[in-house]
Image (cartoon, helix red, strand yellow):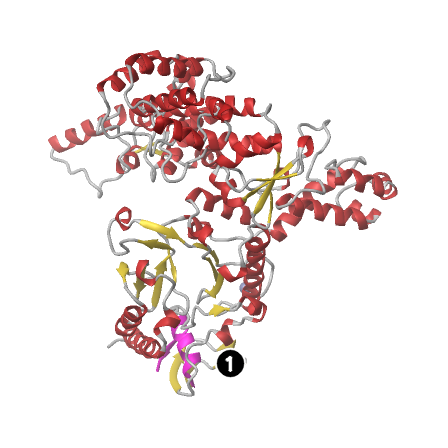
Amino acid sequence: MDASNKNFEFLKQKFHEHYSSVSPEGIAPSDCASREFGAGWDKKIDWRHLALASAFELKSFLVREAPLYVSYSAAHYEAPAAQPMERKNAKAWDLIFDIDAPTLKVEHQHNELFCAKCFEAVRSDTQRLIDFLVGDFGFNEKEIAVNFSGSKGMHVHVTSEEALRLTQDARKQIAAYIKGPKDAAALLMQYDEKAPLRGPNATTSGWKRRAFNAAKEFLEKATVEDLMDYGLRRDRAQRIVAERSVALARLAEGVWDAVAGLEKAWPTLVGGVIARSRVEIDEPVTTDAARLIRLPESLHGGSSLRAARIDLKRLGEFDPLKQAVAFKSGKMIKIKTQRPLEFDFDDETRCVEEGESEIHEGVALFLLCKGKAELA
Amino acid sequence: MRDELIAKYPFLSAAKKFIDAGESEVSYEELETAARSVTSLLSNPAASLTVYSTPAKAARSHALARLLLATLNNRFVTRRYANARAGQAVRELAGENDDDFLEIARDLLPSVEARGRGESALFVVSVFDFLRAGGGLLGANLEKGVVALDRDALSALIEEAVSSRISDFAEAKPKRLPAVVREAAEELRRGIPANALPSMQAAFRGSHLSLPCVQALLRGVPEGKRYYGAMTIAVACAKDGLGRDAAGEVMRQYVDSNERGSSPFTLREGIAVLDWVYKHGGEINFSCRTMREHGFDDGGRLCANCAKRQAFKQQMQHQGKQFGPNQPQRKFGRGFRH
Ligand SMILES: [Zn+2]
């Protein structure tokens, strides 16, 4: 048996052991019998169009086959195993979102193994996505489930009655709303340079409200220097500060250029608020009806981590390298690595030297899945 | 619902009871009148609403017009008619009092509620009704699952909803049609004014847009192929050197001709595709092969380009040369990839 085969068989054995210990109800999705399942060993999905009629059947499948990747359909079908797709007959369709990379790219020292900095950003993106779903779309928190993707992202599932019935066009619109307007011009209106600059007023909501609030907050506090940072001449900036109350009163009515010069500041400012509020979701996951998504609580073959379900209230504290670690026995495993590695794992900084070493099972599996180590 | 309102707006759900109670036989004369009402609205979409003397007459006339359009089976004409009808209704609606306006709005958007009355009245509608009616979310006043609209914005949403309701034939299309209906539909086809048919202006005669396969696309494609169809149309427009506005008009025709399906492919989506293609300019090539792979080959007929390729292939075979994937790809004409 060559080395990669040996690693693969070992992983399969470990995944088999893990799935033997899970409860069927703990791993089955809602309406299990109506879902299409997919499984993979080499690729993420080597095999799809699987129907598993119950939680028990799903568990038996996982124990028997020990797939390294398991996914299921967002859609609920009358005949989940039928092919081609049209013959499956979709009855309903969960509304799902996938955030797999931070929305805002910030300079930082990126850690290839697992980047805590990137994940922190993804986690706060997830919180903003939930704020959109609850605050804007009016979904109930109880109808929203969040889980770790198993790798570096987060998945959000909405299962309210209304969400299940949304058309594809409606989903495209919801995705576009969460990704936000392309630029400030989408929220501000000016026919030509001489025409007044109109924008959202104090009674608006949605994206318009976000733009209005940002403009109002800025105008309430802006100093001459702040305004000059937006490219205004000193005399103009001074006039705006002097006539602040007029500018604010007119802004509330939707007139954004009551004091000359202001029009220069708004595109950048509103563009900034869009960039900070939007969430970069992987759109096809939301809008493609035939999509399969990782099964919550299943293991991810690229990390050995669990696609752990997360309590919405504890989202801010979630750390995959603590809460999503599936293998926690004290067993020691002999591995060899090409390079020395240093990383945080399960609350400890781990150092693995180059060459052979003996380390805890959980850490070893993580490195094996990441392709950073081999069994010695 | 008051009878008077149904006489004006026979697309409302309450009109159904008058259809059910009415005569089930239909005469050729009656169908002819319905056909004339369709052609007359198509030639003058700005005409004001015809108000019938009774709700039963209005409901029957409306049902017959839809039956004829369903029989005619021309999505483009149907969409033009539905848009004109919705426009008429909304112009008339402007004169209705608050209560009637709200009652009609609720028939189309069940969750609508009014806050305040008169000029300053504000309406709220659930985001799900709003999306179903085809409202655009990005600029919407959306909060806690409801969209707030003033009377004008709500009227625009109603217009969309009325147009969809009229052009959705899911229930209106009977399986077996009496000969008299088919005859009247034929009569209607002959009477359709030129302005209601897809325009064949210069814009549509470029070397790509005039390809038979692209022309077939412009007559509409089924659900599931609409996005790729839009992409093809946009690429054809760009390759023909059409300006963005002219291309927008072509896209509008394509969108109007498409099957509505379980979810509409909207003009907004078509335009988004168009903008994307125009932004990526010359990078995208028009591909006859991809057209064939998608079944967009106008029933297997070969366009001049495909025919040229076929001839070339035969000639090569004749000369005993192999022509296949191991041969370098050959290009015919600028921008064509086979
Ligand atoms: Zn990073």
Asked where in the image residue A305 lies, by quadrant, the reply is bottom left
- State the image coordinates of residue A222 (x, y, percent, origin top left): 80, 49
* Residue under the image location 61 percent in, 27 percent down: B97
Mark 1 surroundings within 10 Å by alpha-carbon count, few (fewer than 14), some (14 through 19), many (20 or more): some
- State the image coordinates of residue A303 (x, y, percent, origin top left): 42, 70
The residue tagged 1 is A350
Residue A345 is left or right of residue A213, and the answer is left
Residue B85 is left or right of residue A267, and the answer is left
* Residue under the image location 31 percent in, 53 percent down: A77
Question: Tag 1: residue type?
Answer: Arg
Asked if the residue at label 1 sits under 8 Å from ligand 1, the reply is no
User: From the viewer's perspective, is residue B10 above or below residue A78?
Assistant: above
Chain of the residue under label 1: A
User: From the viewer's perspective, is residue B236 above or below residue A86?
Assistant: above
- State the image coordinates of residue A49 (x, y, percent, origin top left): 27, 57
Magenta segment, which residues?
Answer: A359-376
User: From the viewer's perspective, is residue A19 above or below residue B61?
Assistant: below
Residue B64 is left or right of residue B282, and the answer is left
